[in-house]
Image: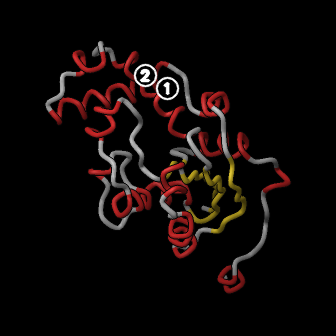
Amino acid sequence: MIERTFVMIKPDGVKRGLIGEVIKRFEQAGLKIVGLKMYRMDKEEADEFYPADDEWFESVGNKTLSSYNELGIDAKKELGTDNPKEIGKMIKQWLLDYVSSGPVILMVLEGNHAIKKVRDMIGSTIPIKAQPGTIRGDFSVDSADWANIGKRAIMNIVHASDSQERAEYEIKFWFKENELYNYKRLEEYLL
């Protein structure tokens, strides 16, 4: 099933000089780059890009509460609340600060089951839980406890669409149709 997905190399990945390594991994896995650009987003664009519904806030808040519990940190003491939705809103603000802090690389990848393949390749959003061999497992130096203490987003190198619906939204958000290219990679001529 050939599909397209959206990937963003976040400011920490750019600042650490990992652009080539990240792209290399995707290309070596048989994924085709059909759109690519460097961009500096502002907080308003980032806010519009990331979800802002109660389900997303609660999901992010619950992940944070889980991390706090694993680390023995009292969320209510540190954040002033243990309400997942309110914590999710805080995390979104931290995320907006993070992704607008420097240039990012925006790309659209195409390939067989591209969405799942890319998600598997990047690893867990919590770097300490990302398996060796994944982009986050091999390159992220941040952790949930450092991020929580600093009241900031976890710097985890890369973002990737998590569903077909989200991929379609994210691609259209950052790319015009004339910025996406159809071409064959060499191995496609062999099929």
Left or right of 36 in this view: 159: left
Q: As displayed, is residue 124 above or below residue 185?
A: above
Which quarter of the picture shows residue 96?
A: top right
**Quadrant where the C terminus is found in the figure:** bottom right
Q: Position of residue 154 (x, y in %)?
A: 39, 41
For image coordinates 42% across by 49% down, the residue present is: 156
The image's colour scheme reads secondary structure
Q: Secondary structure at mark 1?
A: helix
Quadrant of the snapshot with the N terminus: bottom right
Mark identifier at residue 90: 2
Q: Relative to 135, is 103 above or below?
A: above
Q: Is residue 9 left or right of residue 189?
A: left
At x 46%, y 30%, the residue is: 94
Task: Tell me where residue 149 appears, x and y as whole percent.
Answer: 28, 32
Q: For mark 1, what is the residue?
A: 93
Residue at 53% x, 76% y: name it. Answer: 28
* 78 sits to left or right of 88: left
Pointers 2 and 1 in contact (C-beta within 8 Å): yes
Q: Amino acid at mark 2?
A: Met
Image-quadrant location for residue 27? bottom right
- Residue 80's x, y, as percent? 29, 13
